[in-house]
């Protein structure tokens, strides 16, 4: 039963002394549960440690580095680029016990939290007072703020309100030598280099965040959700540009193709039309009369682009239903296929029609079914490639097709990842975007924080072990 | 020493043409920092030339300070050495303007006012109102992460920059970020550059996210008798569903400086609020603002379009308004919890009064940034004591304070940036990694970096 | 990409086991984590739905033994199925956990004490209404005579395992007289429906008044209510415990008892029973076609009482109730039967009532059948969290729609700062309002 482990000395007794006996997992049957995250399964950790204070994190990190053990921080393990799994024998630092909201300061529109706080729980805690935390990744019901900071998480509503980095004011973090630093502050400006901005999105390869000060936003007076239904995909993609051309920035602007929405409809009964080619889900926020007015303009934009119909959600319940359909869309495709691979490319939003055509062509050439879900408003694509991982040929085709799509995104002036992160999935693709000089500078910065590479090894930067390959996940959500 | 330098500047002309290397003393004096003039002013015309100048400076271990319009050149410590003023004036082109994508790539020497006029033709803008106002260069604005009260609605440069190209002291051009609004590939090195005051590398191209210009805008002026009232108004405004573009509170001295004439009501405060959007936004906001004002018994008036815009530009360029009247004034900026602004204003007045000095205070009340000008025509050593007391007060309230402007002779006695935090060692090592020879703005930044 | 070839023989024994068609739907996205009560309390992947499925897969692959560790984590699951609501992939988690527990039941030895108690409760007591009544009478005597107070106060139970004492404290009040089966209650006014009422097993003893209220409310809504005599335990507790053969036997008996005539509906007031009744066909997937067809016919008619009333034209002769109320979603109503609106609609139909939604009404209160008895260390923090959510609403009345939740919430209220707060089933609320009208 015991899995053979490469035997790096595991300082088990020391770990137990630091965090307490019950907060260390080391038996094979327990630690095997920490070999996967939302991407797929990788190395089995030697031990999983659950600290409850910054001091404990600091001691564990110092100990791990001293004994040469890699350390990876883990929130809920919902990430889609392998950020929370080890690539080699090492320690997992589980943050599920550091899940307290330490301070809520509404007058200053900020909150101080431990990294294990679940994204939605923070919004829930301040909702009665009329506030919320803006970045809303699809996994917000489960994912933690620590993970959000590490990955610089986005979400549908980041179109108007920005991604995680725009909402983090300050951090407390443990460095590779176990020392504790404080970056930024609880105010909007802080003299010195913006280390908060650097650490946000660094995927746990520079430091381990132990406390986060975030901004809270005032809830809008009114929210209006529209569903525009199209008989042809290009009409939907063209609408996106004409909405921006009218000077309106919706709070969210999402697109789903016909194939995806049929699966979604069967799963959620959200009321999506079964026979359409594409839908846009558009959300407006603001003063109530203004939202009404903008909804009118958007309706015009949709109809001018040959939308068959534009529906408005008439109640909070209808709105929730439409969003439930969208937020569950990835999983809904899980009903029609054993496995799928979700991509996370970005393009300038005006190139949507082009990339759609390209992806259709890729699907044809590789004989693969593609479902399309976009954060259309900001050009962030989530094509899902359907396959069955028991078939090696399908696996190969999915990998190649994905690589082509990503390369095309870069050619169109976009990026290899918009919100899921690089992790171990795309680190070998970084040269598509960055020159050797660019990467050398990143390495130099990494060496300052993580000189021996013990913090989350094998992530974000190319290892050179594989040549420009994509590492495909078994399946995914979010 | 001088001869050796002259010889090495001759090598510089192998990189740049003769007329790009200005050694005219008058021109150099124009970009002096704290009375220190550089040996020469160079005017590169391309990113490659910028990189070449930096490599040259690195090899020769010379001090370089990037600049454009010198709107922020007084910020920071007195440089340890200053040999070359690197003017980015010639780098003022727009690359890849994609109005439909709401993105643009632009060079750092472009002036903000020119850029806004260019964007306005397509109904767009970059919602920045930094110190220096329309005269500020985009590069300087980004390098200083400089922002004014518009930050309330739109954020700071750090929230609008999608990517950059940077000339490094190794003479290379590196890229950070990209040209799309959502991108998490690799370390966000751009964030390090933004707000680094030119101490890590020189920004040679900036990709901005653009915004639609609000169709209509209205600015309201309210007169408040005391800080209790301004505090109540700020609370009402920020907890309302209204999303003002910006708001400031000024004491009577600041209001007088900004409006250019004596303020009529002594001992009172002026609040300004701007709303933008459709006519409906303007109407609804106006109604709600009026009812807030009524509840607090504040009198209110509106400013019309053109004069409002000019008035906001003067608010942004508070420093010029201040220095045009008080050429020796000290100006500090405190970054505070939003709730502490009024208290700080009060403390500032008291501390200055102890030294027999008046203050002009401008509170970007939506974002917790407070500017305090010490109104003085002559330099007194005791002013250093006042800034130190103000810093203590700011820190006690949970904030920080930097000195933005101070006569050079006073700078020796005061700490411009304040004591660095426990992350300073990382900053020091980052500086070493980017600029191992210490050529970029040497000694000017936090902790003498 | 990991190769998918199982290198070792499966750790499962013969019979029903978690199936590839079910577990392969899990994409390990983790969206279920925070909806899982045990994960919320323990924060361990092993005690999350995703983790439990992963463990089931590892047993299948021969990488994990069907042993103590596996059993502990499977046992700790409340089977609340909150994860099914959270799951974007449509994983039938209930089916997986129940199959895993079936395997445990067949292949794992729990030690003599536990085996004896399980046998006594599941095999010797639950299936026999007459034995249940006998125990009920004894319990009643014990509770009323003062003996219970004596025993609980005497610390006598301290000599027994801790769970026994806790169980003794959580034991339902037996309500005399017991609910009578084999009756037909005529509709009040025009008869619009003829429905059968599944009254439950323990509920006939411990929720006799609730059952009577249910019949009265149905009658006031034009139902002639038949309570078939031969009915018995629905088998929910057995399904949750993995005793699938026993559950099948109980299902066969109920299907037969209710098949006498084509009732307009088979109504239950217990969400736990309702969800299993609706899933009877799943028990016969591998059995005879005949059983399967009968089960399908049966299950199609099963309606939770709230679902039934909300779908009928409600008699609105309800007296106003001036009270602030909040509603707790029973897991097996919301997650297993996907019924959210109906109970709220019924509460809303009572004039004067102010319904304040609590935060996270969809998170388990810790009751979960007999879970609070078996795992008090887990149920207690869940209940405490639930009561905090109730407190936030300022409600004087907690409404829910399941017997187990009623017991648990009442225990919570009794221990809370406001012990006078009431806890009612939706039909009890309606019944009171009808009777006062």
Image (tube, coloured by chain):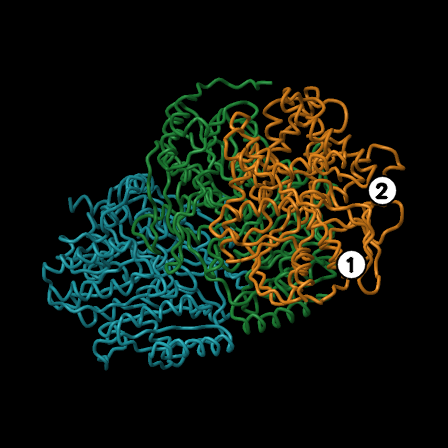
Chain colours: A green, B cyan, C orange
Quarter of the image where the C terminus of chain C is located: bottom right
Q: Looking at the image, can residue C61 be seen?
A: yes
Spot occupied by residue A164 in the image (x, y as percentages of width and height): 47, 50
Q: Mark number for residue B398?
A: none
Question: Is residue C399 placed above or below A223 in the rendered structure?
Answer: above
Q: Nearer the viewer, residue C190 or A219?
A: C190
Q: Chain of mark 1?
A: C
Do circles 1 and 2 both sit on a common chain? yes
Q: Position of residue A464 (x, y in %)?
A: 51, 30
Residue sitting at x 52%, y 62%: B102
- Which residue bears the numbered disc 1? C219
Vertical comparison of C57 with A418: above or below: above
In terms of depth relative to the viewer, which is nearer, A5 or B84?
Answer: A5
Residue B250 location in percent, x, y? Answer: 28, 71
Left or right of C290? Residue C424 is left
Determine the chain carrying the residue at label 2: C
């Amino acid at each position: 039963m015991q899995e053979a482990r490469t035997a790096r000395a595991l300082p088990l007794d020391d770990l137990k002394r630091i965090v307490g006996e019950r907060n260390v997992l080391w038996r094979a049957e327990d630690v095997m549960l920490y070999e996967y995250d939302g991407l797929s399964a990788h190395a089995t950790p030697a031990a999983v440690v659950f600290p409850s204070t910054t001091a404990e994190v600091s001691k564990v990190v110092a100990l791990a580095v001293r004994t040469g053990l890699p350390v990876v921080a883990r929130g809920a393990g919902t990430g889609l680029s392998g950020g929370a799994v080890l690539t080699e024998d090492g320690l997992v630092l589980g943050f599920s016990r550091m899940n307290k909201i330490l301070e809520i300061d509404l007058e200053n529109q900020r909150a101080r939290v431990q990294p294990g706080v679940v994204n939605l729980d923070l919004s829930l805690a301040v909702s009665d007072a009329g506030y919320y935390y803006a970045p809303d990744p699809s996994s917000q019901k489960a994912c933690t703020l620590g993970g959000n900071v590490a990955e610089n998480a986005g979400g549908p509503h980041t179109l108007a309100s920005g991604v995680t980095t725009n909402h983090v004011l300050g951090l407390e973090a443990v460095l590779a030598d176990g020392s504790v630093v404080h970056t930024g502050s609880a105010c909007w400006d802080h003299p010195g280099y913006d280390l908060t901005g650097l650490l946000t999105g660094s995927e746990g390869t520079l430091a381990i965040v132990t406390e986060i000060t975030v901004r809270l936003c005032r809830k809008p007076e009114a929210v209006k959700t529209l569903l525009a239904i199209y008989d042809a995909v290009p009409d939907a993609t063209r609408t996106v540009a004409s909405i921006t051309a009218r000077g309106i920035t919706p709070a969210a602007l999402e697109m789903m193709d016909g194939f995806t929405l049929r699966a979604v409809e069967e799963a959620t009964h959200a009321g999506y039309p079964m026979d359409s080619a594409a839908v846009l889900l558009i959300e407006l926020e603001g003063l109530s009369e203004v939202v009404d007015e903008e909804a009118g303009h958007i309706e015009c934009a949709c109809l001018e682009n040959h939308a068959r119909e534009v529906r408005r959600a008439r109640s909070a319940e209808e709105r929730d239903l439409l969003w439930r359909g969208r937020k569950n869309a990835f999983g809904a495709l899980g009903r029609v296929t054993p496995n799928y691979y979700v991509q996370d490319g970005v393009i300038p939003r005006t190139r949507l029609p082009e990339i759609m055509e390209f992806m259709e062509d890729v699907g044809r050439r590789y004989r693969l079914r593609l479902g399309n879900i976009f954060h259309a408003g900001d050009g962030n694509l989530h094509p899902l490639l359907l396959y069955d991982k028991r078939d090696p040929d399908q696996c190969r085709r999915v990998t190649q097709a994905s690589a082509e799509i990503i390369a095309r995104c870069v050619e169109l002036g976009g990026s290899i990842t918009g919100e899921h992160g690089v992790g171990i999935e795309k680190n070998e693709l970084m040269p598509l975007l960055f020159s050797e000089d660019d990467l050398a500078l990143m390495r130099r910065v990494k060496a300052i924080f993580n000189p021996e590479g013990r913090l989350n090894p094998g992530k974000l930067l190319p290892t050179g072990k594989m040549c420009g390959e994509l590492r495909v996940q078994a399946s995914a959500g979010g | 020493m001088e001869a050796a330098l002259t010889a090495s500047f001759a090598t510089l002309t192998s990189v740049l043409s003769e007329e790009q290397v200005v050694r005219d003393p008058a021109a150099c004096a124009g970009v002096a920092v704290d009375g220190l003039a550089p040996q020469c002013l160079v005017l590169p015309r391309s990113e490659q030339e910028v990189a070449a100048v930096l490599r040259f400076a690195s090899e020769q271990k010379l001090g370089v300070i990037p600049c454009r319009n010198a709107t922020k050149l007084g910020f920071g410590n007195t440089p340890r050495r200053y040999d070359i003023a690197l003017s980015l004036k010639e780098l003022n082109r727009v690359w890849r303007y994609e109005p439909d994508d709401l993105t643009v790539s632009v060079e750092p020497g472009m002036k903000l006012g020119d850029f806004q006029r260019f964007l306005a033709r397509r109904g767009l803008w970059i919602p920045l109102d930094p110190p220096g106002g329309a005269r500020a260069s985009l590069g300087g604005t980004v390098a200083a992460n400089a922002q004014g009260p518009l930050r309330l609605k739109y954020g700071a440069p750090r929230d609008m920059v999608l990517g950059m190209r940077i000339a490094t002291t190794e003479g290379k051009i590196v890229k950070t970020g990209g040209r799309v609004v959502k991108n998490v590939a690799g370390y966000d090195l751009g964030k390090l550059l933004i707000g680094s005051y030119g101490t890590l590398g020189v920004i040679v191209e900036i990709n901005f996210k653009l915004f639609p210009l609000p169709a209509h805008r209205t600015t309201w002026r309210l007169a408040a008798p005391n800080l209790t009232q301004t505090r109540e108004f700020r609370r009402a405004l920020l907890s309302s569903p209204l999303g003002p573009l910006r708001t400031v509170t000024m004491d009577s001295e600041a209001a007088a400086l900004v409006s250019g004439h004596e303020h009529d009501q002594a001992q009172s405060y002026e609040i300004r609020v701007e709303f933008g959007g459709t006519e409906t936004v303007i109407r609804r906001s106006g109604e709600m603002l009026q009812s807030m004002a009524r509840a607090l018994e504040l009198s209110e008036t509106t400013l019309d379009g053109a004069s409002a815009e000019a008035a906001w530009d003067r608010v942004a360029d508070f420093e010029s308004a201040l220095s045009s009247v008080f050429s020796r004034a000290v100006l500090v900026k405190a970054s505070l919890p939003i709730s502490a602004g009024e208290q700080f204003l009060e403390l500032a007045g008291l501390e200055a009064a102890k030294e027999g000095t008046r203050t002009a205070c401008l509170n970007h009340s939506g974002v917790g940034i407070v500017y305090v000008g010490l109104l003085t025509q002559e330099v007194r050593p005791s002013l250093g004591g006042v800034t130190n007391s103000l810093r203590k007060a700011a820190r006690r309230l949970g904030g920080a304070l930097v000195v933005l402007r101070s006569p050079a002779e006073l700078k020796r006695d005061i700490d411009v940036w304040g004591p660095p935090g426990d992350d300073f060692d990382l900053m020091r090592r980052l500086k070493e990694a980017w600029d191992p020879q210490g050529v970029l703005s040497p000694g000017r930044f936090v902790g003498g970096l | 990409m990991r190769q998918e070839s199982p290198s070792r023989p499966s750790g499962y024994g013969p019979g029903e086991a978690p199936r590839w068609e079910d577990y392969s739907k899990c994409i390990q996205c983790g969206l279920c984590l925070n909806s899982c009560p045990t994960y919320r309390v323990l924060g361990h992947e092993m005690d999350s739905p995703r983790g439990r499925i992963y463990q089931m897969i590892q047993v299948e692959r021969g990488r994990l033994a069907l042993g103590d560790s596996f059993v502990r984590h499977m046992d700790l699951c409340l089977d609340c199925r909150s994860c099914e609501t959270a799951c974007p992939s449509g994983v039938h988690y209930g089916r997986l956990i129940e199959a895993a527990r079936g395997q445990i039941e067949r292949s794992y030895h729990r030690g003599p004490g536990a085996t004896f108690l399980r046998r006594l409760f599941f095999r010797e007591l639950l299936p026999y209404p007459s034995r249940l009544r006998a125990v009920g009478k004894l319990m009643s005597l014990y509770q009323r005579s003062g003996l219970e107070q004596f025993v609980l106060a005497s610390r006598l139970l301290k000599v027994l395992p801790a769970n026994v004492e806790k169980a003794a404290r959580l034991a339902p009040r037996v309500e005399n007289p017991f609910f009578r089966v084999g009756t037909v209650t005529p509709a009040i006014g025009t008869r619009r429906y003829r429905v059968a009422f599944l009254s439950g097993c323990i509920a006939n003893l411990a929720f006799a008044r609730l059952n009577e209220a249910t019949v009265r409310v149905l009658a006031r809504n034009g139902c002639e209510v038949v309570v078939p005599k031969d009915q018995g335990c629905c088998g929910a507790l057995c399904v949750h415990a993995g005793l699938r053969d026993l559950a099948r036997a109980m299902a066969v008996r109920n299907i037969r008892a209710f098949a006498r005539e084509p009732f307009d509906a088979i109504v239950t007031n217990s969400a736990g029973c309702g969800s299993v009744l609706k899933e009877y066909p799943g028990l016969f997937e591998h059995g005879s076609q005949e059983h399967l067809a009968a089960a399908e016919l049966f299950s199609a008619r099963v309606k939770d009482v709230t679902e039934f009333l909300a779908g009928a034209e409600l008699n609105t002769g309800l007296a106003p109730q001036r009270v602030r109320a909040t509603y707790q979603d029973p897991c097996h109503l919301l997650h297993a039967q996907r019924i959210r609106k109906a109970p709220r609609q019924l509460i809303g139909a009572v004039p004067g009532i102010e319904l304040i939604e609590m935060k996270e009404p969809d998170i388990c209160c810790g009751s979960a059948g007999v879970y609070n008895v078996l795992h008090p260390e887990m149920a207690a923090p869940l209940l405490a969290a639930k009561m905090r959510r109730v407190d936030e609403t300022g409600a004087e009345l907690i409404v829910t729609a399941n017997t187990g939740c009623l017991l648990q919430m009442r225990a919570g209220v009794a221990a809370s700062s406001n012990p006078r707060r009431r806890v009612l089933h939706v039909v009890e609320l309606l019944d009171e309002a009808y009777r006062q009208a």
